[in-house]
Amino acid sequence: MKVTFLTPPSLDGHKPAERTAGCTRVVYDMVNIYELTVAALLERDGFDVRYKNFVLDKASSADCFAFLEGDDSDVYFFWTVNLSIPTDKQVEAFIHSRRADAWCVFLGPGGTYFTSSLLSHHRSLVVRGEPEETVHELMSLLRDGGDWRGTRGLSYLSDGDGGGVVSNPSRPLIKDLDALPFPAIHFVKDHAFFNPKLKVTPYMAVVTSRNCPFHCIYCVPSSLTFAREIEYKRDHDGRKPPVGFRSVENVVEEIDQLAAQGYKAIGFMDDNFIVTAKRLKGIGEALLRHGIVWGCQARVDAINEEVAAMLKEYGCQYVDLGVESFNDDILKYIKKGITEEQIHRAIALLKEHGVPVKLNILIGTSPLETKETIKDTLRKAKALKVDQVMFNIVSPFPATEFYDLAKENGWIEGGEYVPTDVQRNSILSYPNLSSRDMERLLFRNNLRFFLSPAFIWRNIRQFSSFKEFCGAAKALWIKLFG
């Protein structure tokens, strides 16, 4: 069977949806290693797999539809996030208008939550939650002519006129992540990915674990995590899924392969990369051995003297800290599990050891938020003189505790969640802080931080080439002005 992983260009008049983090529009190209892991699995199963990403190719809608007119794939896979649903539905309809016998399979959080909206044809399927084992079973049955309808984790339309949605029982989480193949990055080898926080190429993303054990009420750290959580919570009274880990040995094997292919920089996309010093040591020594620069996401309470020293020793070029606010009352309300004092302590330790720091600040996470608390957070962030600050606006993502609170209290404009770009737009209004207030404060905060002389001087000296500088400048322009 011929299988194509398809990422169409945006057809809704906006910039394309970013499908890896899954909650923004594209600012700079990111590699979707979640999708490429599924592609690698099907290659291992012997399928004829192709990868057509019209966003990475900077191709037009005409190019996409022309390709589909002449294509004869048996199955098309879409990694669908909330913002991409209108585009993916339009492309699926086009495929079925010409090839009624082709299968269209939707993966990711879009289909996992908005299942029925993506099922409009008897040959459309939704794989909910963690996709790999469901895809493996489904595709084996389709290839061999077996009865695929009992596949766990699958949703589809029942037979007959006006058939309703059938959602099979959920599939248990994957127990052995080491059994999965490494992402099929050979499909994107001609694309020069770039991480502005690392400023070194060639660059690749890696994930060593799945999910995070903490309970921040708003959190959707990646599209895979979101799909995994939505599906698990349905069957477990709203509880978060357990964290899944790859072994250190398996991660080191992937690092060795990336180094052999010439990669010089890695961004670890784990929701929470720093778990124990022992795990960090095993992975860090492999990175140091190959001279790979890297960065990661971490919690401030994971940073102690030992960890900060190890990060410096192993060549870490940024730690992405989710702080959200410098107000202890807000931090407590959102169940962040940290304090302002811990934030300052973690930043001080990282700076002491020369490890660059990026702060993530989320506007509007609590009805306690006001214009004054937001301005105070900006002042404190600037005073700390960290390398970067990312400002976003909270969104009431379905299946989060924050969504339930927002619905119950009437904070969502229009009464119901609609997909929005958290780097630009708000659908929330509190009694003391409107959606427009949040959007204006977001824009002003970004301007004041990213266009400050201190930020420009600190960062411009770190680029190794003019090309890398131009890539980062373009991404910054898109972030600020769209």
Image: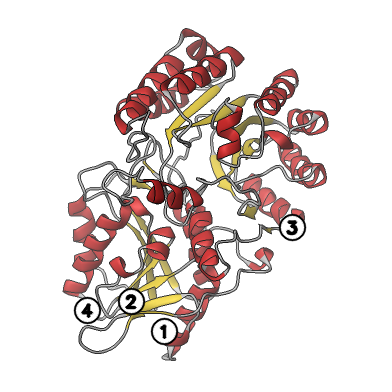
Instruction: Give whichever of discs 3 and 2 has the lower sequence position.
Output: 2
C-alpha span from label 3 to label 2: 35 Å
Instruction: Give whichever of discs 1 and 2 has the lower sequence position.
Output: 2
- Residue in view at x 37 percent, y 29 percent: 433
Instruction: Give whichever of discs 1 and 3 has the lower sequence position.
Output: 1
C-alpha span from label 4 to label 1: 16 Å
Label 4 neighbourhood size at 10 Å, few (<14), some (14-19), many (20+)? few
Which amino acid type is shown beneath numbered disc 3? Answer: Ser
Does the residue at mark 4 contact the one at mark 3 (Cβ under 8 Å)?
no
Q: Is residue 158 above or below residue 134?
A: below
| Circle number at residue 74 | 2
Which amino acid type is shown beneath numbered disc 1? Answer: Leu
Q: Is residue 207 left or right of residue 191?
A: right
- Residue in view at x 60 percent, y 51 percent: 207
Location of the N terminus by quadrant is: bottom left
Label 1 neighbourhood size at 10 Å, few (<14), some (14-19), many (20+)? some
C-alpha span from label 4 to label 3: 43 Å
Name the residue tied to disc 4. Answer: 100
Give the structural element (helix, strand or loop) at label 2.
Answer: loop
Does the residue at mark 1 contact the one at mark 2 (Cβ under 8 Å)?
yes
Closer to the camera: disc 3 or disc 2? 3
